[in-house]
DNA sequence: AACTACAATGAAAGCGCTTACAGTTTGTTC
DNA sequence: GAACAAACTGTAAGCGCTTTCATTGTAGTT
């Protein structure tokens, strides 16, 4: 392996100087810089980042924990982060926590062992306490898609309540008054907040929330189908249904069609998340956009700001979702 | 920062012994092992992987180049690799090449600078020559989703020709004889091979390939739509259409519906790739499964085999795609 | 008791780089 | 041309760990 030492000998300088031209630190006379560059090229020198990191105590690497590598959801977030970190010459070390507490902690520990300069965490199983404790330590970290009051400065999340509100308000604006709600898991903050937004839109419009028009699901497509069937059994009337996410909306649409209801002519459906397939459905799914990419970008900016002192970055901690109007929502039929 | 040194002092042993218990190498008497463990716990010791890698000249890290972080396509592949590497206690360092030659080379270089033990590459812009040259060097590398004759041992890819063949054979088996083909970009090997498979199925069934029943697209949904419209202008008759990928199939289906053709009653459509949204379409898209996850797993196995000498792994270099029969293909109508 | 064969440990030399600090040039200014 | 600042470069001490080699402890044999 070619080392800095060999380069320095060939170039007739000290290894310190070689290091200086590699890192472009301090001032190096142009003539010697050229000599060093030539020697590096001739020897096929490759910088050893490991050794550099050890000596400088900086890795220029951000540890990144996501629940899964597959699925466009986290993919978009990572892509957003990668884009802004690349410009700053920082790298990401991505690991997966698989929504398992032990695994998540273990992976964070591994990231710390690798001496990451900072962490970006999307963890689902780890307790708030642990994260609070971690945030108090010396490694900068930002938590995405999760809001923890005590360390809100470290959190970047979406206003789910607002999203739920926008979805239902959209239906109301189209003239719907009998609006069913297919909720996600209510032990999750997202499920709870989206429902809260739904209720707020209702009450703001002077509509009362009818418990029997709501079914709790689990964010899976199957539970969207099941929800529609339950609603059918209850023999409730409704002209629109708001869903806790796109998967459930997709399941709901299929169930609706099986019951010979047309979407959107008979029933309007709105989803949440705006996942990739939303636009591939026919008609395209009206939904609430979850700006994962921007969240990823924001998280990276936060890191640049805190871990590398780049204070030009403007930061937002709670992003606002937007409605994406496609083909599954229609004006309510005249009475 | 707590070092091995401090631990060794507290435990009353040498730092070599501490290293031994950390790495579980050599034999350490149980009593001293416990002493060391206690000291580590008490001091809150965290192993420094950087220093360890530098000293041992092994990083236990696999460099991974993908075109993009978003999209389920590469996500599934990474997830597959991650699963098998995790079991072997290896980590992945994922970077993106964005299908740009310079960037891809740069990122590979960065991975090498980080002293990755091996590389898994899905690169699209880099030349065969460069990869061949790289493969001859000392770092083990496997190339996924690409076949290069000279280093076929390092390649893991899908039999695209077979996929194209299966898709069209499926249509033929359903009784279709007038089969249109919406091809992908023909300057890409995948596009070419899939088309070749289509032709083989045709000729095997005694059907002749009709150039005017084919349109070249670019793997995007829009080009699928456009393809159908072009076909309509040509006023050709067909009862089925095979598409180079699912996006194009989705576009084609929308265009077909716009022309008042029902899928699959009037026209059968088959895609390729089996992307996530394929099953969310209504009806579900009949397609050819591109087993990205398995390819990812296979790549990881190859690495374990070559870079870490785990020879228990069985390896396959060319994976076979399978047909996934869903709802967009039907028996051909009686004449 | 003397010997052998391991098992268990320690000493110390790196791994390849960064970075004070000190020392040497070089360029300016009066 | 002396004085001084600024620009440039070298020396050497680490960064925290692994690993070879040598040494010591510990049974088991004869």
Image (cartoon, coloured by chain):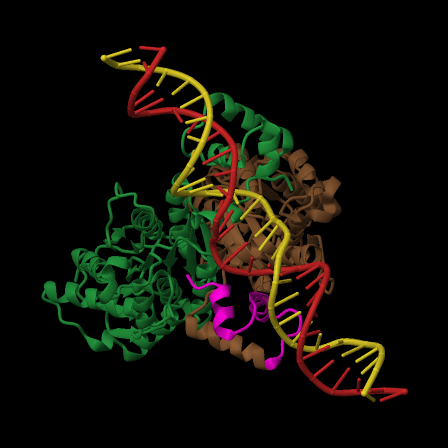
Chain colours: A green, B brown, C yellow, D red
Q: Pick whichever, A296 or A113, lies toward us.
A: A113
Q: Position of residue A108 (x, y in %)?
A: 43, 63
Task: Please state the extent of the stretch shown in magenta in the rendering.
Answer: B1-30
Quick check: A296 left or right of B253?
left
Quick check: A323 left or right of B98?
left
Determine whether A276 is above or below A243 in the image: above
Tell me which secondary structure the magenta stretch mostly adopts.
helix
Determine whether A40 is above or below A216 in the image: above
Question: Is B26 within the magenta?
Answer: yes
Quick check: A298 left or right of A3?
left
Q: Position of residue A65 (x, y in %)?
A: 42, 60
Q: Pick whichever, B298 or A136, lies toward us.
A: A136
Q: Position of residue B52 (x, y in %)?
A: 56, 58
Q: Where, by quadrant of the figure, is residue A115 drawn?
A: bottom left
Q: Quadrant of the C terminus of chain A?
A: bottom left
Q: Pick whichever, B58 or B118, lies toward us.
A: B58
**In percent of the image, x 30 and y 50: which residue is there?**
A306
Q: Quadrant of the N terminus of chain A?
A: top right
Visible in this render: residue B269?
A: yes
């Amino acid at each position: 392996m070619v080392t800095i030492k060999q380069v320095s000998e060939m170039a007739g300088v000290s290894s310190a100087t070689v290091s200086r031209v590699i890192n472009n630190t301090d001032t190096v006379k142009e003539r010697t810089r050229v000599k060093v560059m030539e020697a590096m090229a001739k020897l096929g020198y490759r910088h050893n980042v490991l050794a550099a990191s050890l000596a400088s105590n900086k890795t220029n690497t951000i540890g990144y924990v996501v629940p899964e590598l597959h699925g466009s959801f986290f993919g978009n977030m990572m892509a957003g982060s990668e884009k802004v970190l690349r410009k700053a010459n920082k790298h990401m070390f991505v690991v997966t926590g698989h929504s398992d507490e032990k695994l998540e902690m273990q992976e964070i520990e591994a990231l710390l062992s690798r001496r990451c300069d900072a962490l970006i965490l999307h963890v689902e199983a780890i307790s708030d306490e642990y994260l609070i404790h971690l945030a108090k330590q010396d490694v900068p970290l930002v938590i995405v898609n999760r809001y923890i009051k005590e360390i809100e400065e470290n959190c970047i999340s979406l206003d789910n309540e607002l999203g739920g509100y926008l979805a239902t308000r959209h239906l109301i604006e189209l003239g719907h008054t009998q609006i069913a709600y297919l909720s996600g898991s209510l032990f999750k903050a997202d499920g709870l907040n989206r429902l809260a937004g739904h209720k707020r839109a209702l009450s703001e419009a002077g509509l009362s929330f009818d418990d029997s028009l709501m079914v709790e699901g689990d964010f899976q497509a199957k539970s969207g189908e099941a929800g529609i069937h339950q609603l059918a059994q209850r023999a409730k009337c409704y002209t629109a249904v708001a869903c806790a996410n796109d998967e459930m909306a997709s399941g709901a649409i299929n169930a609706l069609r099986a019951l010979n209801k047309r979407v959107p002519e008979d029933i309007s459906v709105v989803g949440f998340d705006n996942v990739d397939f939303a636009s591939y459905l026919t008609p395209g799914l009206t939904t609430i956009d979850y700006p994962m990419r921007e969240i990823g970008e924001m998280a990276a900016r936060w890191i640049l700001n805190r871990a590398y002192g780049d204070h030009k970055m403007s930061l937002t901690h709670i992003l606002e979702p937007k409605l994406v109007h496609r083909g599954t929502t229609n004006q309510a039929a005249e009475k």
